[in-house]
Amino acid sequence: MAPPDFHSVEGGEEPGNAAFVVRFRGTPSQVARVRGLVTAALGRDHPLYDDCVLLTSELATNAILHSRSGDGGWFTVSVHSAGPLVRVLVKDGGSSGVPCACRTGTQATSGRGLPLIEALSHRWGVVRESGATAVWFELRLVTIPAQRSAEAL
């Protein structure tokens, strides 16, 4: 019997801190469920929501297309939100090659996911161990101080 597909842990002392961990089948139809997980974890009004949905979808798609998860396996998505920081980790069944943020040609139909993560995230990385691959990224809400008026100078 498979373990439960959904596990949610509310965390931290501050409101809005949460961790969601979900296990998905390695099929393309699950990418929509992954987007639903981000919605459950952050809510559509979160200022990092759009970027987080996009980047998480990219990692889920990569897990399905480029790892053993897409060959009848599973992958896990973790979404952690704490104040101005959102951290997402996608752990898949591993593959023979290391994920690469390599640049592709303008006519290529794939290969833009990790460069997109590199461009939009605050930081990201890859961990390979015990045959599995985990790719993670962090998005940080950056607040820009209000500009002082000329009169205040």
Image: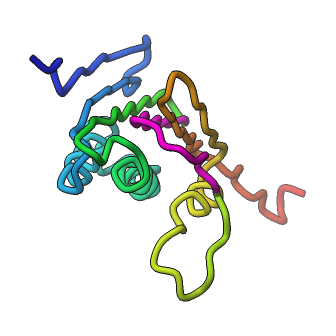
| Residue 84: image location, x then y, percent | 54, 36
Residue at horizontal 43 percent and vertical 53 percent from the top: 66
Exactly how many numbered labels are in the figure?
A: 0
Residue at horizontal 28 percent and vertical 46 percent from the top: 71
Quadrant where the image shows the N terminus: top left
Instruction: Tell me if 62 is positioned left or right of 127 in this view.
Output: left
| Vertical comparison of 107 with 21: above or below | below
Residue at horizontal 36 percent and vertical 35 percent from the top: 77
The image quadrant of residue 117 is bottom right
Extreme-left residue of the structure:
1
| Residue 48: image location, x then y, percent | 46, 50
The image quadrant of residue 65 is bottom left
Q: Nearer the viewer, residue 58 or 39?
A: 58
What segment is highlighted magenta in the picture? 85-100
| Residue 87: image location, x then y, percent | 50, 35
Extreme-right residue of the structure:
153
Instruction: Tell me if 93 is positioned left or right of 113 in this view.
Output: left
Q: Nearer the viewer, residue 56 or 108?
A: 108
| Residue 151: image location, x then y, percent | 83, 62
Extreme-front residue of the structure:
96
Q: Nearer the viewer, residue 144 or 1?
A: 1
102 is within the stretch colored magenta: no
Extreme-top residue of the structure:
13
Residue at horizontal 37 percent and vertical 24 percent from the top: 19
**Colour treatment of the image:** rainbow
| Vertical comparison of 96 with 77: above or below | below
Quadrant where the image shows the C terminus: bottom right
